[in-house]
Amino acid sequence: MKQKLFYILFSMLIFVAMSCDDYDKWTTSPLATLRLSCDTVNFGTVITEQSSPTQTMWLWNDHKEGIRISDIRLAEGSSSLFRVNVDGRYLSNGQGADFEVRGADSLCVRLEVKAPDIDSDEPHKHSDKLLFTLESGRQQELVLEAEGQDVRILKAQQFDRDATLKAGRPYLVYDSLVVLSDATLSIEPGAILLFHDGVSLVVRGSLQAVGEVEKPIIFRGDRMDNLLDYLPYDNTTNRWGGIHFMPNCKPSRLAHCDIHSGDYGIQLDESEKIDSDVPSLHLSNSIIHNVAGAALSVRDNSAIVEGTQFSNALGNVVDLLGGHTSFTHCTMAQFYPWLAERGAALCLADHVGDGPHRVDHPLLSASFVNCIVTGYADDVVEFSLTDTQDARSPWLISHCLLRTPHTSDDRLVEVIFDEEDLSPNGKDHFSLFDTENFLYDFTPKPESIVRGKADPSVTQMISPNDRRGRKRIHDDGTSDLGSEAYYEN
């Protein structure tokens, strides 16, 4: 037994010695190179004068023998905009020496960039090369690229008089952006507002954000990098707050706006004077997409909405409580991808709570014409309304697609019920559903049932063109339901 144990221990020592011998071998063969995890590190667009998020790449040695790196340096040297850390060591003045990658091992390279402000509205490109000189004399390189974007910074900004935000370089908003009760904030077509984490646009006065087909006004978060290699932060929720119209705000208009990736989209609070002819909010040809709360919330107020897409909200996509509201050629699509416990696509109510805890919010009117209301669930329409023998809730749904169980009511006119036999989960009506990259296009497919089902007289009167400028009325005189008009590629 002792002799057998001796041979086992002796064999293990020999194996360890041989392994250590291989581990400490180094090659200077010019044929032995490192495998780079990528040949280019592209930082995308970065805000100037700010350090970018860190990018990581790897140097792999696939050989049994180790490889020594005599020199790692940036081609631009100390003037480079890029900063490099190799295996925990920062390159001083853009250069470092004497690195080792043992056999079947790797080195981690972390990179940052800080682009300068050059006083330009347009993005400006920057590049460099990270050069690796091996002990053999062989040289390898990594290309570094970034695009700097100069911004105008608004920090704890309050507008107490009329003001205009211009197009050109984006605005970077910190802390808050508030329009006080006696002020009107106008935003030019093509303007871009980048909001820092948790920051909202708060409107006590009036907001006039009227974009154009080719120059939409964009409201989004300020993260321009990726959460994952394939997934930009801009395609995720909770990147900023949202647009909050406070109680008794002045009438506002938004057109050709792109509002996405916030905690919520638009929140319109109550008004002491609800006027259906002069609404507190007139919203047209816009998109509110991918938010963690409601895409649109209206509380005891008035809103006219035309040609607008509301999509992918963790809360109710459109959430209405009391007041006057009118929707024409809108798409309300509940396909929120991040959690299964989503809200409804459309929620309409005239009270909150029940019994002694009930609080009434009178519904003055609600109409939905030429709209699409659909989603993943079998029923994405939620009404909490009071009908009595003497009075019925004043709502109308005409020429719409609804994903809800079939029901009969004379307030439902020419309604298509989007039940499972029509489409398994509602998404089959639309052109693009890329749930891996979270990209969506709610233009109807050519075979979708929503084609040609709109009331063309309403289309011509209210919303003759969609938000992309396409004519809604086809050559045969018909028009399609929803915010997007079908077109042939």
Image (cartoon, rainbow, N blue to C red):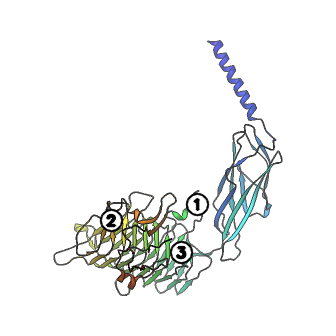
Indicate the secondary structure of the residue bearing disc 1: strand
Looking at the picture, tell me which residue is in the foreground, 32 or 149.
32
- The residue where tag 3 is placed is 218
Q: In the rendering, at what x and y percent does residue 45 appear?
A: 63, 67
**Amino acid type of the residue that numbered disc 3 sits on in the rendered structure:** Ile
Which of the marked residues, 3 or 1, is nearer the chain's N terminus? 3
- The amino acid pointed to by label 1 is Asn
The answer to which of 437 and 87 lies nearer the viewer is: 437
Tag 1: Cα neighbours inside 10 Å, few (<14), some, or many (≥20)?
Answer: some
Q: What percent of the width, then of the height, locates residue 43?
A: 65, 62
Residue 62 lies left or right of residue 394; in this view the side is right
Q: Is residue 382 left or right of residue 446?
A: left
Quick check: 267 above or below 248? above
228 and 330: which is toward the camera: 330
How far is the residue under mark 3 from the one under mark 1? 19 Å
Q: Which residue is mark 1?
A: 226
Q: Residue at x 56, y 79 (%)?
A: 190
Quarter the N terminus occupies = top right
Residue where numbered disc 2 is placed: 418
Residue 138 on image: x %, y %: 81, 48
- The location of residue 475, given as percent across then percent down, is 42, 80
Residue at the outermost left position: 389
Q: Residues within 10 Å of mark 2 (few under 14, many from 20)?
A: many
Q: Is residue 252 above or below residue 437?
A: below
Task: State the SS at label 2.
Answer: loop
Counting residues from the N terminus, which is met first, the one under dot 2 or under dot 1? Answer: 1
**Nearer the observer, 482 or 82:** 482
Q: Residue at x 36, y 68 (%)?
A: 449
**Numbered disc total:** 3
Q: Are circles 3 and 1 on residues that touch, CB within 8 Å?
A: no
